[in-house]
Image (spheres, rainbow, N blue to C red):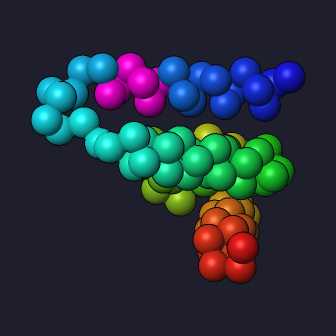
Amino acid sequence: MIDHWRRRELERTWLEILSILPEEEAPSPETQLLFLETLNTIDRVLDSLKPSIRQAFLLAQLEGFTCPQIAKKLDVSLATVKRYIAKALRRCYECRYEA
């Protein structure tokens, strides 16, 4: 149920973005479908990570936090943050190249 809700939320957000683009800049229906499939894949990859790893990865990738900032926020060592991010990147790589 949560996966379905999250998938719908991703699709809704994507459609909102499309609605503000000028028609001549809007991607083709095929590109739109490919993008939605990619978003769903990314969501599944992130969901497969342990919460602490996912949080560290998202803080780094989406929020622009440095490793020391993440370590402080999560109250873990710098080495742990680096290990978390490496695990997340490895999982992304596996999904991209071993699928």
Residue at x 65% of width, y 52% of height = 41
Q: Is residue 77 above or below residue 32?
A: below
Asked whether 63 or 10 is in front, the reply is 10
Q: Position of residue 90 (x, y in %)?
A: 68, 73
**Outermost residue to the bottom:** 98
Q: Which picture quadrant has residue 32?
A: top left
Q: Which picture quadrant has residue 21?
A: top left
**Outermost residue to the front:** 29
**Outermost residue to the right:** 1
Q: Which quarter of the image is occupied by the N terminus?
A: top right
Q: Position of residue 53 (x, y in %)?
A: 73, 54
Asked whether 95 or 76 is in front, the reply is 95
Q: Position of residue 40 (x, y in %)?
A: 64, 44
Q: Position of residue 82 (x, y in %)?
A: 63, 68
Q: Is residue 51 above or below residue 16?
A: below
Is residue 21 visible to the viewer in this orientation of the structure? yes
Start-end of magenta stretch: 13-18
Main SS, magenta residues: helix
Residue at x 38% of width, y 20% of height = 16
Is residue 79 visible to the viewer in this orientation of the structure? no
